[in-house]
Image: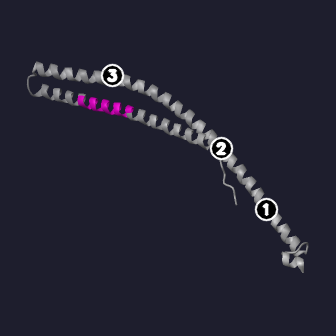
Amino acid sequence: MALRFRFRLQTVLRVRELREREAKRKVGAKLAEIAALDHANQQAAAEIARCQRVLLSKQGDQPLNIRDLAASRGWIAHLRRTIVERQIARQALVAELDALRRALAQARTQTRVLEKLRERRLTEWKRAAGVREQNETDEVAQRLLIHQAGGWPASDDEAQA
C-alpha cells in the first residue's frame, strides 16, 4: 500500500496562509476607505461647481440677494474645508495602506517560503516513492526470473513431489 505524502509543517503553512489572507483583507478595506474619501471629495467638488453655476446664473438674471450670496459662499467654503480635511485624512490612510502593503508582502514571502519547501519535499518524496516502487518491481521480476529458471518451486505441492 502506497504511503501518502505528509508535510509536517502543513499547519504552519495554513496559519501563514490565513495571515496572508487577513493582510489582503486589511489592504482591501483600506483601499475601500480611500476610495470612499475620493468619492466624497468628487461629490463635494461637483456640488461646489453646481453652486457656482447657480450663483453665476443668478448674477445675470436679477439683482443678487446678499443673504443668498453669503449663504452660498458659506456653503462653498464649508465644502472646500471638508475637501481639505478629507485630503488630510486620505494622506493618513495612504500611510497606513503603505504599512499594510509591507505587512502583506512580508506575509506573502513567509507563505511562499513554506510553499516552496513543501514543493521541494513533495518532489523528494515522489522521487523516493519512485525508487521504492522500482525496487519492488525489480524484486518481483527477479523472483519471477528465478522461478522460471527453476530456482525454487512455485508452491508447496511441487516441493513435495
Image coordinates for residue 129, horizontal then vertical, percent: 73, 55
First in residue order: circle 1 vs circle 2: 2
Decide: few, some or many residues near mark 3? Use Cα within 10 Å; few <14, some 14-19, many ≥20: few
> What secondary structure is marked by label 3?
helix
Question: Does 40 lie within the magenta span?
Answer: yes
Q: Return the residue at label 1.
A: 136
Q: Return the residue at label 3.
A: 85
Labels 1, 3: front one: 1
C-alpha gap between disc 3 and disc 2: 52 Å
* Rendered-image quadrant of the C terminus: bottom right
Taken as a whole, is the magenta stretch helix, strand or loop?
helix
* Rendered-image quadrant of the N terminus: bottom right
C-alpha gap between disc 1 and disc 2: 26 Å
Residues tagged 1 and 2 counted as in contact (Cβ below 8 A): no
Q: Is residue 129 left or right of residue 24?
A: right
Q: Return the residue at label 2.
A: 8
- Residue under the image location 70 percent in, 50 percent down: 123
Q: How is the image coloured?
A: one colour
> Farthest residue toward the left?
62
Image coordinates for residue 5, horizontal then vertical, percent: 66, 52
